[in-house]
Image (cartoon, rainbow, N blue to C red):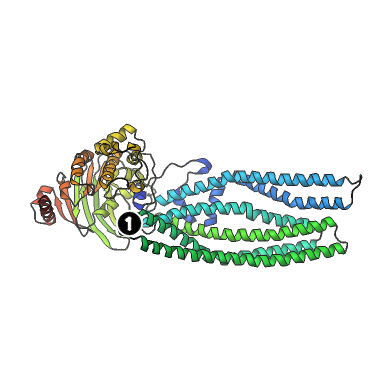
């Protein structure tokens, strides 16, 4: 395909760095509640967990307002139930008789308050069931999209399992904190103030003292809870490490089995678990200390309140109903301090885990589109490396003043010792990293000034280590072009010589390939990658040891498929098996980030140098194998 079209379809990445960055364009996002936002804005919340939560609450402010009003009303009726009970007791104190009609009226009010209380709680709970789940869905979606925009360096420095764990932990923490605030923090707070107001109708001094006790206990509990944040942060980090270690172990189970490493991996995992358990135990023991302190304070306060109320009754300063009101509301206030303290402590723990996760996930993106970036356009695909300098993340230089021009439609093979810069050249062309100086251009356009989506739409990679999803063969092939028809998928598979082994499978194209394609052989995975590349049909093709996993028979079977795939495209191939480059237009030999030989295969074969020596070694190896 000579034409480099700008495609509007979107795609998502996986946790794996190579897949995430290679397929970095993001999936479409629902527009409900203002979902479409710039993902680069999320990094500002890396150290502001409460502002991050508020961002999502504002999107669904109407249902949150319904929940707020319902809870406030429910708590109000709940507190008023105790006051209505006072009316029933006072009415009963007057004794039975035809003139005492207040009892039934007081009972009617009491029952009405109880019914209203329960009804409003159900409204709040049902609304919350939809709203809170929606918020967590929004958060997971946005965090996933933000994570897939990170550079390979971000992923190489972290375990995939810990990243996935943190996304789940973040949404779960916010779900829990929302529920706690609505059902565990707000109700006791409102109940305490409402109860103090009713007690003030009996004795203002008592109400004032209860208010002071309530405030003092809450402040004390909150300060003690805040002091335990380091323990909760440590537990959150250790829990994420356990998840990451587990995912890493499961993903490499074949390696563990091959080296009989079950025992030592079990010991290693036991050590990780033990570290997490110590952190969890420290966090929970600290929480329990807070609860013990609160229990002691509550017992003392309840005893003082009951003694005061009885003294007032004996002095004739309070009716039976008022004594009941003071006792029930006083106990409600003190219970509220317990509920509020426990909720605040638990919320502190979840907030710590939320803050730790956001600190990791919401780091700013290393690679972002230029503010004036435009889609990559043009006919063909001329590639230019112009005075390029690049260092590894640790500072080691790879390229210094590197120049290379590849004409449209040219097939270029990259050859050289390991560490010469071949794979780095592929990464720079796909803009997985930005160069230190110089420019990389495609059709005269600096790739740092074009959109990353259009750049990667223009490039197809057939890698040595094929990435596959645990999905059907059809879905894995169609990943090259999601809108492709079944017929087009079939044609691509046939061109890549896949149909024979696919048809031999019980479920054909609907066969699930297993984690990373574990159910397929290396050669079969390679052919699926070629079929995917054929379907994508991009003007630039990068082959990274594309036939390395194939035996001689399989290699011969797909050589024509590769030839068909390369027609009309600009091709760059990394190969150690020089026989795969015999029909290429040009060979570039790299050593230490420099071009030491550049020419056609025939010319380089007749020149002394690395390529000729490599050809001799390969010929000798083939002769020995044939013997």
Q: Is residue 443 visible?
A: no
Does residue 520 sit above or below 189 in this rendering? above
Crowding near pointer 1: few (<14 within 10 Å), some, many (20+)? few
Q: Is residue 66 visible?
A: yes
Instruction: Answer left or right for 364 relative to 118.
Output: left
Give whichever of 81, 451 is nearer the camera.
81
- Can you give x and y, in whole percent of width and height, for residue 469 in the image? 36, 45
Q: Residue at the spot x=80%, y=44% of the render?
A: 108
Q: Quadrant of residue 392?
A: bottom left
Q: Which residue is mark 1?
A: 257
Give whichever of 492, 218 is nearer the camera.
492
Does residue 527 sit above or below 439 in this rendering? above
- Can you give x and y, in whole percent of width and height, for residue 279 in the image? 50, 65
Does residue 470 sit above or below 195 in this rendering? above
Instruction: Answer left or right for 190 relative to 467.
Output: right
Give whichever of 590, 552 is nearer the camera.
552
- Can you give x and y, in whole percent of width and height, for residue 41 in the image? 46, 51
**Tag 1, which secondary structure?**
helix
Residue furthest to the left in view is 606
Residue furthest to the top in view is 487
Quadrant of image for the N terminus: top left
- Can you give x and y, in whole percent of width and height, for residue 59 in the image? 55, 46
Q: How many marks?
A: 1
């Amino acid at each position: 395909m000579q034409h480099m079209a700008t495609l509007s379809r979107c795609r998502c990445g996986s946790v794996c760095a190579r897949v995430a960055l290679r397929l970095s364009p993001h999936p479409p996002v629902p527009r409900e509640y203002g979902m479409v936002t710039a993902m680069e804005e999320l990094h500002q919340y890396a150290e502001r967990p409460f502002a991050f939560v508020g961002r999502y609450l504002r999107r669904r402010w109407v249902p949150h307002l319904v929940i707020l009003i319902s809870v406030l009303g429910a708590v109000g009726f709940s507190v008023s139930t105790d006051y209505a009970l006072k009316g029933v007791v006072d009415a009963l104190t007057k004794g039975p008789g035809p003139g005492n009609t207040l009892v039934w009226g007081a009972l009617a009010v009491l029952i009405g308050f109880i019914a209203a209380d329960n009804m409003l709680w159900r409204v709040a709970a049902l609304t919350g069931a939809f709203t809170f789940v929606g918020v967590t869905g929004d958060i997971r979606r946005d965090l996933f999209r933000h994570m897939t925009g990170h550079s390979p360096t971000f992923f190489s420095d972290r375990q995939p399992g810990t990243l996935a764990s943190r996304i789940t932990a973040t949404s779960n923490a916010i779900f829990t904190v929302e529920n706690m605030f609505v059902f565990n923090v707000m109700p006791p707070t409102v109940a305490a103030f409402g109860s103090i107001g009713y007690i003030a109708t009996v004795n203002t001094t008592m109400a004032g003292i209860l208010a002071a006790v309530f405030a003092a206990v809450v402040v004390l509990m909150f300060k003690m809870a805040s002091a335990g944040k380091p323990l909760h942060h440590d537990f959150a980090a250790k829990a994420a490490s356990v998840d990451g270690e587990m995912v890493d172990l499961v993903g490499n189970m074949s390696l563990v089995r091959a080296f009989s490493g079950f025992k030592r991996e079990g010991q290693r995992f036991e050590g990780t678990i033990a570290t997490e358990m110590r952190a969890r135990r420290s966090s929970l023991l600290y929480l329990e200390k807070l609860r013990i302190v609160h229990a002691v304070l509550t017992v003392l306060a309840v005893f003082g309140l009951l003694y005061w109320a009885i003294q007032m009754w004996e002095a004739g300063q309070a009716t039976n109903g008022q004594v009941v009101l003071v006792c029930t509301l006083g106990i409600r206030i003190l219970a509220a301090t317990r509920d509020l303290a426990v909720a605040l402590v638990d919320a502190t723990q979840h907030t710590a885990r939320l803050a730790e996760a956001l600190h990791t996930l919401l780091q700013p993106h290393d690679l972002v589109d230029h503010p004036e970036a435009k889609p990559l356009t043009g006919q063909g695909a001329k590639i230019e490396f112009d005075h390029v300098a690049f260092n590894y993340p640790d500072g080691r230089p790879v390229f210094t003043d590197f120049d290379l021009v590849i004409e449209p439609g040219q097939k270029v093979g990259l050859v050289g010792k390991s560490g010469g810069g071949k794979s780095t050249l592929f990464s720079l062309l796909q803009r997985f990293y930005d160069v230190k100086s110089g420019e990389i251009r495609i059709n005269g356009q600096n790739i740092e000034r074009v959109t990353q989506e259009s750049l990667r739409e223009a490039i197809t990679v057939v890698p040595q280590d094929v990435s596959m999803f645990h999905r059907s063969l059809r879905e894995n092939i169609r990943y090259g072009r999601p809108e492709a028809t079944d017929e087009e998928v079939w044609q691509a598979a046939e061109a890549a010589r896949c149909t024979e082994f696919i048809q031999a499978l019980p479920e054909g194209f609907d066969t699930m390939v297993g984690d990373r394609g574990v159910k397929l052989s290396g050669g079969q995975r390679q052919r699926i990658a070629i079929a995917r590349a054929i379907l994508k049909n991009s003007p630039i093709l990068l082959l990274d040891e594309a036939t390395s996993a194939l035996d001689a028979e399989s290699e011969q079977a797909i050589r024509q498929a590769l030839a068909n795939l390369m027609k009309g495209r600009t091709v760059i191939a990394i190969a150690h098996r020089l026989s795969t480059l015999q029909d290429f237009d040009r060979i570039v030999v790299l050593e230490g980030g420099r071009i030491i030989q550049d020419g056609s295969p025939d010319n380089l074969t007749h020149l002394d140098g690395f390529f000729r020596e490599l050809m001799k070694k390969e010929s000798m190896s083939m002769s020995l194998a044939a013997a």
